[in-house]
Amino acid sequence: MRNTIPGIMDRLDTDKPLLLDGGLATELQQRGADISGPLWSARMLLDDPQAIRQLHLDYLWAGADCLITATYQATFPGLLEAGLNSQQAAEVLNRAVRMAVEARQLLVDDPLRSSDRPDPLIAASIGPYGAYRHDGSEYSGDYGLSLAQLVDFHRERIHQLATSNADLLACETIPSLLEAQALVKVLAEVPAMPVWLSFSCRDGQHICHGERIADCGQLLDEVPQVVGIGINCTAPGFVEPLIENLRGQTEKPIVVYPNSGETWDGGSHSWTGTASCEDFVRAAQRWHAAGASLIGGCCRTGPEHIRALATAFPR
């Protein structure tokens, strides 16, 4: 039976944070996957879905309480452009959820699993329009599209994943208030589906397009099916003030899963700088103290980061 909105909220009402998983695409790349094309990590749903299932399972054994599916870049337009028809595209989305469901079942069936550990949740990823463009515009939000066009873009995937076996939707790396408004309009068509929305941010007060994170929190606070509001794919140093700005607008659970702390160099298409699990955990403890209820990692984080978080926040 699908988790209800009150049921999800009950899972989040705990002294310990719910642990999300870590990066998907960057970790697959670390493991040798070629994700260089426009479909990015979604290409693996066609070429090697079992690699995605294994990564999901690795995150669960590391301590994740919630998996995020490999559908961030899996859009109907993108899959159609890759040569699939609509039915095949829908199957790819279903396959992504199925890989997470199968990983969860492998954990549940393992005799070494703690009997008092709740079954992990599965959040179906909804990436921004910029992810489909594959040009980095999810970090600017400068699409040149109207509200109605964004609504049309998001509608088919949201409806498809809302009928899947996912427990909730994760609308993530949203760069603009306009795109958040478009998502809210589509989500109203599936009002029983729980969802969190998380934003990519450029500093401690503003999302990437320039709107205040506080205004995003105010918008989403009034949407009953929104069970979490937060920040992802953002530099860790911005997270604490962003939480504080959100907490001033909402009592809903705060979701944070920033990048590792390394910096993406668009010119060389590589990550620079260093970041340690120890630094990430120390920061996560501050995020929790500031009010974060769901904590995980985004780009360049892996199972070792989630394992370290699970040690820092024991069940």
Image (cartoon, rainbow, N blue to C red):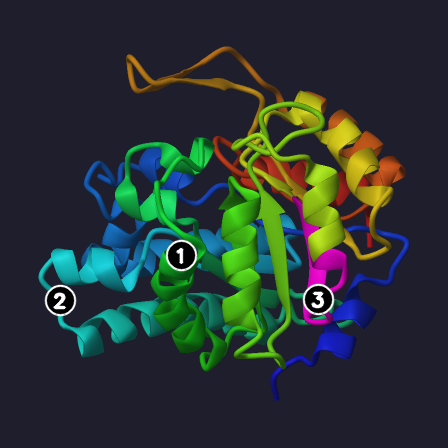
Disc 2 and disc 3: Cα gap in Å? 35 Å
Q: In which quarter of the image is the C terminus?
A: bottom right
- Secondary structure under tag 1 reads helix
State which region is magenta.
220-230
**Which of 91/221 is in front?**
221
Nearer to us of marks 2 and 3 is 3
Residue 123 quadrant? bottom right
Pointer 2: what residue? 84
Disc 2 and disc 1: Cα gap in Å? 22 Å
**Residue at the (61%, 83%) spot, across then down:** 2
- Secondary structure under tag 2 reads loop
Question: Which numbered disc, 3 or 1, marks the residue that appears first in the sequence?
Answer: 1
Q: Where is residue 109 in the image (x, y as percent from the top left)?
A: 56, 75
Label 2 is placed on what type of residue?
Leu
- Secondary structure under tag 3 reads loop
Mark 3 crowdedness (10 Å alpha carbons): few <14, some 14-19, many ≥20: some
Mark 2 crowdedness (10 Å alpha carbons): few <14, some 14-19, many ≥20: some
Label 3 is placed on what type of residue?
Val
Residue 280 quadrant? top right
Nearer to us of marks 2 and 1 is 1
Question: Which numbered disc, 2 or 3, marks the residue that appears first in the sequence?
Answer: 2
Pointer 1: what residue? 150
